[in-house]
Amino acid sequence: MPLYEFDCQNCGTFEKFRSMSEASKPMLCPTCQVEAKRIYSVAGLIMTPQSLRTRIDKSAEPRLVNRSEAKHSHTHKHHHHEHGRPWMIGH
């Protein structure tokens, strides 16, 4: 069962294991029995190594390239055929 985090206005945050089918149902604070809101956070970042977190953060930023880099960045080598469709040769 996944561990969900909730925020009670009176008592603060708490965590609770719940089945996925109960994930969207209201949760009562175990201390004061007031309905608590679910907190959505990024999963597993505490256990993720710093180097991986840095790579994830950098991957979200667009990489800027200059015009000369953009011209030479094509690594795939596909052939353009003058007749259009190579599978139709001889038809």
Image (tube, grey):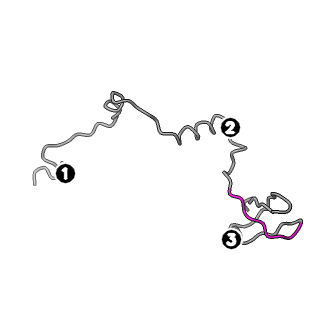
**Labels 3 & 2 near each other (Cβ < 8 A):** no
* Residue 81 percent location from the top left of the image: 17, 43
Total marks in image: 3
Q: Of all residues shown, which one is farthest toward the top?
A: 68
Circle on res. 21: 3
Amino acid residing under circle 2: Pro
The residue under label 1 is 87
The residue under label 2 is 49
Q: Which residue sits at x=36%, y=29%? A: 69
Amino acid residing under circle 3: Ser
Q: Nearer the viewer, residue 3 or 58?
A: 58
Horizontal placement of 77 versus 32: left or right? left
Q: Is residue 63 above or below residue 12?
A: above
* Residue 64 percent location from the top left of the image: 44, 34
Which segment is the magenta one?
A: 32-40
Dot 2: element? loop
Q: Of all residues shown, which one is farthest toward the front?
A: 9
* Residue 25 percent location from the top left of the image: 71, 72
Q: Nearer the viewer, residue 47 or 57?
A: 57
